[in-house]
Image: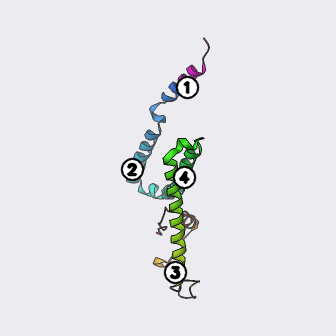
Amino acid sequence: MTQTPDNERAAQATRIAAKPWYRQLYVQVLVAIVIGIVLGWRWPELAAAMEPLGTTFITAMKMLIGPIVFLTIVGGIAGVADLKKVGLTGIKALAYFQVGTIVAMADRFRGRRSLSSFGATGDPPAGRVPAPPGGEGLRDVRDAMGACAPHGPGRRARRR
C-alpha cells in the first residue's frame, strides 16, 4: 500500500507527538531550574563561578525579545496576501504603530531641546565628571560587554 500525502502527514504528526517525555522543552527547563537550585544550595562556590554564564544568557534574552516580537508581528501581517483579510485589526495595528512612532520622535526632540535650555549641551568641564560609585569603573572585559547590552526599555545597566 502506498502512502498518500495525507497519510504521510498524519504519520509524521504521530511521530512528532510521540516524543519521549525528557525531550519536551518544559521538562528540560524544569530540570535545569532544579539543577540550578541544587547547585546553589550544595556548591555555592561553583554556582558563583557559573554566574557569568547565567548573566550572559539573561542579557542575550533581553536583547532578543524585542526583535523577536516585532518580527513575529510583521511576519504575521506580511504573510496575509489580501489586505481585506487583515481588515480592521491590521489598520489599527498600523495606526498604533504610526502614533507611537510620532509620539516617541516628538518626545525625543522635545527632550533634546529642553535639556539644551538647562545648559546640558556639551561635555562637562574636566574635573566635574563624577566618579563611579565605590570608586571603580568597569573592572574587566565581562563588565564592559555587559554594559554594552541593552537592559530593556527605559532601564539602565546596573553596576555591581
Instruction: Look at 53% across and 44% down and name the residue there.
Output: 86
User: Marks 3/2: CA distance?
Assistant: 47 Å
**Label 3 sits on residue:** 115
Q: 123 and 107: which one is in front? A: 107
Q: Nearer the viewer, mark 3 or mark 2?
A: 3
Q: 27 and 69: which one is in front? A: 69
The reply to whether the C-beta atoms of the residues labelled 3 and 2 are less than 8 Å apart is: no
> Which comes before the other along the chain, label 3 or label 1?
1
Segment tinted magenta in the rendering: 1-11
Crowding at mark 1 (Cα within 10 Å: few <14, some 14-19, many 20+):
few
The picture places residue 28, in percent across and down from the top left corner, at 46, 41
Is residue 10 within the magenta segment?
A: yes
Is residue 62 visible to us here?
A: no
**Label 1 sits on residue:** 12
> Which comes before the other along the chain, label 2 or label 4?
2
Q: Secondary structure at mark 4?
A: helix
The reply to whether the C-beta atoms of the residues labelled 3 and 1 are less than 8 Å apart is: no
Instruction: Look at 44% across and 57% down and name the residue there.
Output: 45
**Label 4 sits on residue:** 70
Give, as a three-letter code, the residue at label 3. Leu
